[in-house]
Amino acid sequence: MRLILDRIERTQNGKRIAVFECEDSFINIHEDNMPLGFINELKAGMILGAEIDADKLLSPKILYEETEKKQKEIKNRLNNLFNRKKK
């Protein structure tokens, strides 16, 4: 399954919850339901390949090349929009 990290939120007790975009919906995964320390590697916009079972993130892998490609694509779109307004 392909997930995109939207944001990381904190609960009242200080635990973190990762909010992922998956197709047309959002999925919340508590840091206790992913491999130990994995949440520390995440940044908004990162694309992951993983499976989800019973609200647990299984075998997650950050897709660095795909993330970088998508970030460049978005940056180019924004630059094109700004350049159009300057004309």
Image (tube, grey):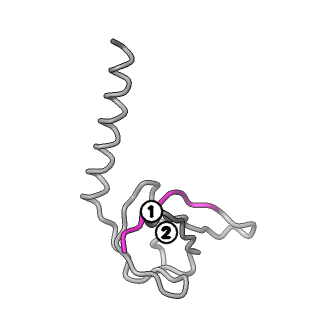
Q: Which mark is residue 28?
A: none
Q: Which mark is residue 42?
A: 1
In the drawing, does residue 65 fall left or right of residue 60?
Answer: left
Amino acid carrying label 2: it is Ile
Considering the image in quadrants, where does the N terminus appear?
bottom left
Who is closer to the viewer here, 24 or 76? 24
Q: Which residue is mark 2?
A: 39
Q: Are marks 2 and 1 in contact (CB under 8 Å)?
A: yes
In the drawing, does residue 12 fall left or right of residue 41?
Answer: right
In the drawing, does residue 29 fall left or right of residue 75?
Answer: right
Q: Residue at x 48, y 74 (%)?
A: 37
Q: Residue at x 26, y 51 (%)?
A: 69
How many angstroms separate mark 2 from mark 1 (CA)? 5 Å
Amino acid carrying label 1: it is Leu
**Disc 1 secondary structure class:** loop
Identify the magenta region: 1-9
Where is residue 22 drawn, in percent x and y?
A: 45, 67
